[in-house]
Structure formats: structure tokens, C-alpha cells
Amino acid sequence: MKTSALITLIVVILIFGITLFTLLRTETGKEIPGTSAGANENTPKINEIPLPQPSQTYNVEMINHAYSPKVLIIKKGDTVIWTNNDKTTTHTVTSTGGKELSSKFLKYEENYTHTFDKEGKFFYYCIAHASEHGEVIVE
């Protein structure tokens, strides 16, 4: 008799636990979106929700009268650092149109930093060397 009472108690505890678990997973009697029972093709899965990406920093080198890389593709909010690695001359980073980029004349190992807050194509050149030009594409 004691064994059947113990088995009955275990069954009641299991039923109570399952019921409690089910109630905790639901909200006002409906399945919470994203769980298996309430999910459908329109319910985004947790791993499919895009997370904001941290801003990136990119480097452009000024050497041998050229920018390297010449074209850079970045995201809105990213930062570009131009560094003069030419020991014998100065360089600038100057917008071809507009005033987005406007550095001073940079001596050897000096740099110019700019964070791009809007999308678009940004063309630039070196005032001292007309053939030296580059482009930043912000997506």
C-alpha cells in the first residue's frame, strides 16, 4: 500500500511540474512567439534577428604618391584613418566635391581620422599631388 501511495505522489508531482512548465511558457493562454508550438514561417527565430554591428576602423596608407587601398567600402558609422608613410613628402586628404574630408598637410607618420555618418561615395585627392586620389564608399 505504501508503494502505490508513493507512485501516486510521484505521478501527481510530475503532472504538477509539467503543468507549471507549460504555464510558464505561455502568456495569457497563448504560446509565446518563437517557441516551437507557436512558431510559424513569419515568426523570426532568435538567431535570425540582425544584431547591430560594432563600428569598424580602417586604415589607408599614403605612400609612393598613392593611397592604399585606393577604394575602400565601409559601413555607415565606420572610421577611416589615413597615415602618411612617405618619408620625403607631405600629403592631404581633401574632398573632390563638398567639405566632408579636409586634412592639413600631413608629415611623415601623421594621420587624419574621419568617421562617416552618412551613406554615399566620397572622392578625395591630395592637394600636393593631383594624380593621387581615392574613394570611400559608405553603404
Image: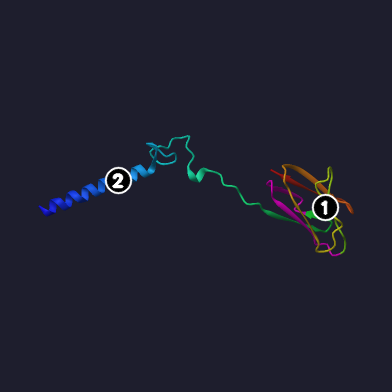
What is the number of the mark on residue 46? none
Which-is-in-front pick, marks 1 and 2?
2
Q: How is the image coloured?
A: rainbow
Q: SS of the residue at dot 2? A: helix
Does residue 87 appear to the left or right of 76 in the view shown? right
Check contact, mark 1 vs mark 2: CB within 8 A: no
Amino acid beneath label 2:
Ile
Task: Name the side, left or right, on which 30 lies relative to 51.
Answer: left
| Nearest to the observer: residue 14 or residue 112 | 14
Give percent across and percent down for residue 135: 77, 47
Looking at the rendered image, the quarter that the C terminus falls into is: top right
* Of the image marks 1 and 2, the number of the one nearer the N terminus: 2
Numbered disc 1: secondary structure: loop
> Does residue 101 show up magenta in the picture?
no
Q: Position of residue 102 (x, y in %)?
A: 83, 51
Q: Which residue is depicted at the point 43% across and 35% down?
A: 40
Q: How many marks?
A: 2
User: Label 1 neighbourhood size at 10 Å, few (<14), some (14-19), many (20+)?
Assistant: many
Q: Which mark is residue 93?
A: 1
Residue found at x 32% / y 45%: 20
Residue 133 on image: x %, y %: 82, 49
- Disc 2 designates what residue? 18
Q: Which residue of the protein is positioned furthest toward the front in this rendering? A: 28
* Amino acid, disc 1: Val
Magenta part of the chain: 68-87
What residue is drawn where x is 25% and y is 45%? 15
